[in-house]
Image: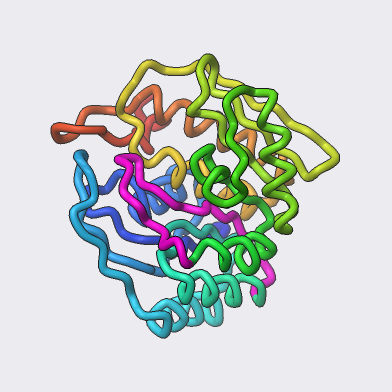
Amino acid sequence: MTPPRVLTVAGSDSGGGAGIQADLKTMLALGVHGMSVLTAVTAQNSLGVRGVWELPAEAVRAQYRAVVDDIGVQAVKTGMLGSAELVETVAELISGTDAPAVVDPVGVSKHGDTLLAASALDAVRTKLLPAAAVATPNLDEVRQLTGVRVESEDDLRRAADAVLAYGPRWALIKGGHLAGDAVDLLTDGTAEHWLRAPRHRNRHTHGTGCTLASAIASGLARGLAVPEAVAAAKEYVTGAIAAGFPLGAGTGPVDHGWRFRA
């Protein structure tokens, strides 16, 4: 029996903690067939990003069409896109695909390295977010895209409203950078779902955003509604953070295979 198929459109992380590598590990762990469109190659490790080499738009388009036109997809997840040209290309592709898209508007790496050109922000707002079934910005990305600064849980609604104004059907505002429990707000502007998890005092959190977005896409591909897919993804990434392990001299990755070792 053919498993559900999920396509990730993102950059490569040579250290294996985030990006395409994290996406495919997540998809395998959650029982879907993961496929990939590579947008950039990065040289990075636990200490940071040493270099980024973006692929041309025609290479991204060719990869996408090769997969979707032959194999088909039940969900798409986007990550690091880098430039306005790539954002516009990917937005056009996912808009023409009959599958929900989870957009992780990656702007800055876990180590603080910029992964999205300032010139691409408007394309994210006007082209990519309107094509999203679910947008999953963290608080830095909310501020980068909307100007809203979130300093408490009370600000999460205002952040969600600002993101929804750009057109995604659902916004998941990730409050992991706030103090206290790890609380996220999922809303479509009408229904609200607050997702809470205990904060694990663990610095090995590289890849959390990629992992969460890929887990949501995996749930959607399996036929879950958005709130159920997000709740399941939150549970999965919380376990992966708790099981994160040291790797190298800096920030280690979450453990994508934690359920296999539980």
The residue depicted at 47 percent of the width and 81 percent of the height is 61
The residue depicted at 70 percent of the width and 46 percent of the height is 162
* Color theme of the render: rainbow
Query: In which image quadrant can residue 53 be found?
Result: bottom left
Which secondary structure dominates the residues rendered in magenta? loop
State the image coordinates of residue 34 (x, y, percent, origin top left).
Answer: 45, 59
The residue depicted at 58 percent of the width and 46 percent of the height is 136
**Whether residue 158 can be seen here:** yes
User: What's drawn in magenta, residue-wise?
Assistant: 97-119
**In this picture, is 196 found above or below 51?**
above
State the image coordinates of residue 222 (x, y, percent, origin top left).
Answer: 63, 51
Quadrant containing the C terminus in the rendered view: top left
**Whether residue 2 can be seen here:** no
The residue depicted at 38 percent of the width and 68 percent of the height is 39
Give 215 or 139, whichever is nearer the viewer.
Answer: 139
Query: In which image quadrant can residue 52 be found?
Result: bottom left
Query: In which image quadrant can residue 133 be found?
Result: bottom right
State the image coordinates of residue 167 (x, y, percent, origin top left).
Answer: 73, 58
